[in-house]
Every structure is written in structure tokens, then in C-alpha cells.
Image: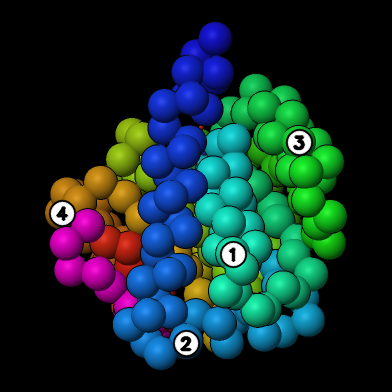
């Protein structure tokens, strides 16, 4: 019931925020967003991806009649909550039935706030992703230093030229922590809408 309530109330808003981030980035940076999708294939890592709102938001952008780029996409949703994998499976099946999608998806259990995950985390590779998303993740109680360390580890492994899309409640406590992590490991802010985010880093 709770998961259904989330899908009903929050997911549409998060989907729209992600879609708007790409639209605004494209508008303000003269189509720069589209260079990312000009590759034949794009691999996306959603951190704290829950039921996959960011996946649907990205698809809404790419399947907009005015968007011409449609790479083969692969998504990896990372989340600590196992139950979301069931929800994501239903969303995914619905998407596959509604669109002819050329993409794959995996659901990876990962608790970014659990220090015991440290060793398992070391075994995981994050260097093959072209795009990372952090959508409404920090504000869901993820402000601990362990999370900061995990994110630093993940983003310092990322390949050169990858992007991070960050969208969250516009409070300094959340935004500042990401602004603290990324420049330290040489990521540069390439886009930021001054009012309510989003931030895009490269
Ligand atoms: C507000 S939801 C956002 C979900 C999705 N990104 C969206 O926009 O709909 C926050 C998500 O972060 C996940 N989460 C919270 N703490 C986490 C942690 N320590 N490690 C991994 N995921 C976590 C939750 O399970 C939840 O799915």
C-alpha cells in the first residue's frame, strides 16, 4: 500500500523533475544534453533509484517527439530497499509492453549508509557508467558520513566524461554535501538551475 501511495503521489513529480532537467539543460546549453545521447549506447546508474522514477523521466525526455537521439540504454537501479525491486519489475514490464524499448535493466541491492557494506562495495564496479542519478536520495535520511564516503568512492571510480544528475529538496544540508564531494574528486558543475536545482556535474 505504501509503495502504491509513493507511485501515485511522488513518482509523477520526480519523473517530471527529471524530464524538466534534461529539457532545461538542452534549452539553456544549446542542445548540450543531446551530446550525451548521441552515443550508440548509454549506461545509467541510479543511486537510491527506488521504483525507477529517474528511468521513466529520462525515457520521457528521449521519447519526446522533438528528441532525435535514442541510444540503446542500460539501467542499473541501486537501492537498499528490496521491495522496490518488485515494484520496479512491474513498472518495467509496463514500459516494455507500452513502448518498443531497446534497453536492459538490473536491480542491485545496495545500502550506501551501511558500514558493513564496505567490503562488498569494494567488489562492485562503477567505472562503466556514462550517467549517474541521485534523485531525492540525500533528503531521504541519507546525510551520514558513511553515505558521503560511499558516494565519494563511487564517483571517484567513474569514467572520465561521465555525468551526474542531482535533484533534491533545495536545502543547503543536502546540496552542500554533494557540492563538497564532487569538486574534491575533480568533477565540474556543468549546469545548475538557480531556483530548485537540478545540478549536472561532469
Ligand atoms: C525519496 S526516494 C527516491 C527514489 C527515486 N530516486 C525517485 O526519485 O522516486 C529515496 C530512495 O533512497 C533509498 N535509500 C535511502 N537510503 C538509502 C541507502 N542508505 N542506500 C541506498 N538507498 C537508500 C530509499 O530506499 C528510496 O528508494
Q: CA distance from mark 4 to mark 2?
A: 27 Å
- Pointer 4 or 3: first along the chain: 3
Magenta segment's dominant SS is loop
Q: CA distance from mark 1 to mark 4?
A: 33 Å
- Pointer 3 or 2: first along the chain: 2
Q: CA distance from mark 1 to mark 2?
A: 17 Å
Q: Locate residue 85, reporting x and y percent.
A: 70, 31
Residue at 83 percent across and 41 percent down: it is 97
Residue at 16 percent across and 62 percent down: it is 195
- Pointer 1 or 2: first along the chain: 2
* Near-viewer residue (179 or 122): 179
Image disc number at residue 172: 4
Q: Look at the picture and state if 37 lies above or below 65.
A: below
Image disc number at residue 94: 3
Instruction: Report crowding for label 4: few under 14, some 14 to 19, many 20 or more residues within 10 A (C-alpha).
Output: few
Q: Locate residue 200, reporting x and y percent.
A: 39, 72
| Residue 69 is covered by the magenta coloring | no
Cβ–Cβ under 8 Å for marks 4 and 2: no
Q: Secondary structure at mark 3?
A: helix
* Near-viewer residue (23 or 202): 23
Q: CA distance from mark 3 to mark 1?
A: 18 Å
Instruction: Report crowding for label 3: few under 14, some 14 to 19, many 20 or more residues within 10 A (C-alpha).
Output: few
Q: Secondary structure at mark 2?
A: helix
- Pointer 3 or 1: first along the chain: 1
Image disc number at residue 64: 1
Cβ–Cβ under 8 Å for marks 3 and 2: no
| For discs 4 and 3, the disc positioned in front in the rendered view | 3
| For discs 3 and 1, the disc positioned in front in the rendered view | 1
| Residue 188 is covered by the magenta coloring | yes
Q: Which residues are magenta?
A: 186-196
Which residue is under mark 2? 32
CB at disc 2 and ligand 1 closer than 8 Å? no
Amino acid at each position: 500500500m505504501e509503495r502504491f501511495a509513493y507511485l501515485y503521489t511522488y513518482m509523477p513529480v520526480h519523473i517530471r523533475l527529471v524530464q524538466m532537467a534534461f529539457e532545461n539543460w538542452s534549452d539553456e546549453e544549446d542542445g548540450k544534453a543531446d551530446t550525451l545521447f548521441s552515443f550508440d549506447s548509454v549506461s545509467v546508474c541510479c543511486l537510491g533509484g527506488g521504483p525507477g522514477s529517474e528511468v521513466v523521466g529520462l525515457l520521457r525526455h528521449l521519447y519526446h517527439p522533438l528528441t532525435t537521439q535514442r541510444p540503446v540504454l542500460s539501467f542499473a537501479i541501486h537501492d537498499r530497499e528490496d521491495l522496490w525491486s518488485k515494484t520496479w519489475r512491474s513498472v518495467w514490464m509496463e514500459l516494455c509492453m507500452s513502448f518498443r524499448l531497446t534497453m536492459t535493466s538490473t536491480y542491485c541491492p545496495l545500502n550506501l549508509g551501511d558500514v558493513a557494506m564496505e567490503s562488498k562495495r569494494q567488489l562492485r564496479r562503477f567505472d562503466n557508467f556514462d550517467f549517474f542519478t541521485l534523485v531525492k536520495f540525500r533528503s531521504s535520511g541519507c546525510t551520514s558520513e558513511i553515505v558521503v564516503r560511499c558516494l565519494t568512492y563511487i564517483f571517484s571510480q567513474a569514467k572520465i566524461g561521465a555525468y551526474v544528475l542531482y535533484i533534491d529538496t533545495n536545502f543547503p544540508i543536502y546540496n552542500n554535501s554533494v557540492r563538497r564531494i564532487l569538486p574534491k574528486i575533480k568533477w565540474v558543475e556543468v549546469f545548475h538551475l538557480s531556483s530548485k536545482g537540478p545540478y549536472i556535474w561532469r
